[in-house]
Image: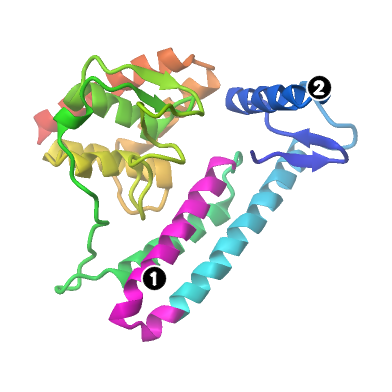
């Protein structure tokens, strides 16, 4: 969950998603006949806010350091890679991407090491999967038809941000305008999960969920490509794509979270944002 310990107290930032996480944990403790207390703390005696934030960063720095160490070992193996070993190394790289994604999800204060490790993983991906002409191959995504996913309910985590909001817009715009989308951390067998730990629509390699969904359904027009690059940069921050709209969109999305918009409000604003952006890029293109 990303909590850090102060003596016997587990601490998370004062964010809605963190509070929901603690409430879920409290329910599990109570089901086991245990006692639990959730409280909001304005300040820890003898610790400034910056000192608390630094403690969070130090824990995440350790997590990123472990990933970086494994990535360095993987880089060494590329020097003498055999074709028969390529699949095994690719699987190891996917695990490191997953570990990075899990760590990034609880990196509440944006450790700079996160971007450094992601850049390292992306470089390995480029080295590992060159095409015959020396350019980077794309991650293999199994194709699907829109018809397969119509009239199905979808679920993603609460407090949707850039990647999930873009996916919601894509679902409503190109797959099912009347799609039912739930916000929770559990998935029923009949539901389609996206940007969660399970399901076919999630980060793959150095692709965010929006890019994976685009490739799955063969949605590749030029305006969507621009949108996917903006979403990719805000979500992964690997400096792979540069667009002038990106900083403004990033600030706007963060502002919505800081303003504590509900999930439904985030969905509505996100759909309007990406619809307008798509129209503007499509027209200018």
Of the pair 200 and 263, the residue shown nearer to us:
200
Residue 119: x and y in percent read 43, 60
Residue 127: x and y in percent read 32, 72
Relative placement, left or right, of 203 versus 278 is right
In the image, is residue 81 part of the stretch drawn in magenta?
yes
User: Looking at the rendered structure, which numbered label has been put on residue 37?
Assistant: 2
Of the pair 258 and 247, the residue shown nearer to us:
258
Magenta segment, principal secondary structure? helix
> What colour scheme does the image use?
rainbow
Which is more N-terminal, label 2 or label 1? 2
Residue 27: x and y in percent read 69, 22
Q: Which residue is mark 1?
A: 88
Taking the spot 30% from the left edge, 20% from the top edge, the residue there is 271
Res. 160 image quadrant: top left
Which SS class for mark 1? helix
As displayed, is residue 84 above or below residue 214?
below
Judge depth for marks 1 and 2 and give the one in front.
Answer: 1
Relative placement, left or right, of 1 versus 146 is right
Residue 284: x and y in percent read 11, 32
Work out whether residue 280 can be spotted. Answer: no
Of the pair 29 and 189, the residue shown nearer to us:
189
In the image, is residue 241 part of the stretch drawn in magenta?
no
Taking the spot 61% from the left edge, 63% from the top edge, the residue there is 66
Relative placement, left or right, of 96 versus 201 is right
As displayed, is residue 196 above or below residue 29?
below
Image quadrant where one finds the C terminus: top left
Query: The magenta stretch spans which residues?
Result: 77-106
In 3D space, how far apart are the residues under numbered discs 1 and 2 (Cα atoms)? 46 Å
């Amino acid at each position: 969950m990303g909590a850090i310990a102060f003596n016997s107290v587990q601490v998370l930032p004062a964010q809605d998603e963190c509070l929901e996480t603690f409430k879920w944990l409290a329910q599990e403790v109570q089901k086991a006949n245990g006692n639990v207390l959730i409280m909001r703390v304005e300040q820890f005696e003898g610790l400034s806010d910056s000192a608390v934030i630094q403690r969070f960063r130090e824990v995440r720095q350790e997590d990123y350091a472990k990933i970086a160490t494994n990535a360095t070992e993987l880089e060494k193996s590329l020097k003498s890679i055999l074709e028969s070993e390529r699949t095994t190394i690719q699987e190891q790289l996917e695990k490191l991407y997953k570990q990075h994604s899990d760590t990034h999800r609880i990196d509440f204060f944006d450790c700079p090491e996160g971007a450094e490790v992601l850049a390292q993983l992306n470089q390995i991906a480029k080295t590992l999967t060159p095409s015959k002409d020396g350019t980077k191959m794309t991650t293999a995504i199994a194709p699907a038809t829109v018809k397969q996913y119509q009239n199905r309910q979808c679920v993603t985590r609460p407090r949707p941000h850039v990647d999930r909001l873009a996916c919601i817009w894509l679902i409503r715009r190109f797959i099912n305008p009347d799609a039912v989308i739930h916000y929770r951390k559990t998935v029923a067998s009949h539901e389609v999960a996206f940007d969660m730990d399970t399901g076919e629509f999630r980060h793959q390699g150095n692709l965010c969920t929006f890019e994976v969904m685009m490739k799955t359904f063969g949605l590749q027009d030029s305006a969507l490509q621009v949108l996917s690059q903006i979403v990719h940069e805000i979500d992964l921050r690997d400096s792979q794509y540069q667009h002038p709209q990106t900083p403004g969109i990033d600030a706007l999305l963060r502002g919505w979270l800081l303003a504590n918009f509900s999930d439904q409000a985030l969905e509505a604003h996100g759909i309007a944002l990406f619809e307008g952006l798509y129209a503007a890029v499509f027209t200018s293109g």
